[in-house]
Structure formats: C-alpha cells, structure tokens
Image (cartoon, grey):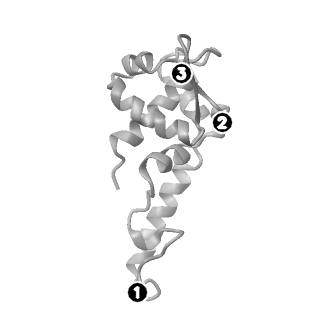
Amino acid sequence: MKISTRGRYALRLMLDLALNDSGTPLRIKQIAQRQDISDKYLEQIVSILNKARYVQSIRGPQGGYLLTKKPEEYTVGMILRLTEGSLAPVDCVEAEFPSCEKMEDCVTSIVWKKMNDAINDVIDNITLADLMAWQIEKNGGYSI
C-alpha cells in the first residue's frame, strides 16, 4: 500500500488549517506557499474536503477555508480514507466487501487481516490534534 500525494497533501492541508487557525479563513494560496504545493492541486483536494464537510468554504474578498470541527475530532484515517479510498492492503480484507471465495481456507488472509488491523489501529488513533502537538514539539514550540 502506498499513500498518494492526494492523501499526503490533504493531511498537510488539514494540519496547516489547524495550526494556523486564528478564526479567519485561510486562502489556498497561503497554504500552498507554506506547504510548497501547487495551489491548483490543493484546490482539487480542498474541494473533496469541502464536499465531505471537513472544511468550510467562505466566499468573498476575505474568504478562504476553515475546519468545521475541532482538530481532535479528525483522525488521520478519516482524512486518508476520504482522499484515498480503502487502505486495505488487499481486496479480500475489505470490511464491506470480502471478495475472495477462498477466504475461509486461505492462510495468507491472516497476514493481510493483521496488516489491515495494524494500519487501521494507527491511523484511527492519531488525530489532527496529535499531529499539531507533534509539529509544535518538532519545531521547538512554533507552529508552521
């Protein structure tokens, strides 16, 4: 499994919004510059986040984007699944649609299930607030 730039940049975008939240909307150009990401690409990503109501779009000259929830209410898993889709290492361990007829007899499915459980355990137990704290700690008390 490999996380695409869309998933990685969505996480960075959400983290930037959280770290730089002053109550006023942040513009994509500002975030793109801070994150060294194309503003056109970030616009595509923020559109996905906006449709899912993870961010709120404010129109007008003072417009931009704000988080709709508190940082502790977003998990890394929520953001990655929204932008990446399933994070299961193989189709047969998809929670919703186990697709393999050999699932009952296949011993390798145990490996895939354990991998899937480990991935989910990590990404579903790290919040945006955790990332904020780690970022501030890493930068000696300063946010990005």
Q: Earlier in the sequence, mark 1 or mark 3?
A: 1
9 sits left or right of 130 in the view: left
State if disc 2 and disc 3 touch (CB < 8 Å): no
Dot 2 alpha-carbon crowd within 10 angstroms: few under 14, some 14 to 19, many 20 or more: few
Q: Earlier in the sequence, mark 3 or mark 2?
A: 2
Which residue was labeled with disc 2? Answer: 72
Question: Which element is circle 3 on?
Answer: helix
Give me the residue at 59% from left, 47% from top: 125
The answer to whether residue 57 is above or below residue 73 is above
Determine the image quadrant of residue 91: bottom left
Give me the residue at 41% from left, 42% from top: 7
Dot 3 alpha-carbon crowd within 10 angstroms: few under 14, some 14 to 19, many 20 or more: some
Taking the view exactly as shown, the residue that stands out farthest to the front is 60
Real-space Cα separation, disc 3 to disc 2, in angstroms:
15 Å
- Amino acid type, label 3: Ile
Quarter of the figure with the N terminus: bottom left
Which residue was labeled with disc 1? Answer: 102
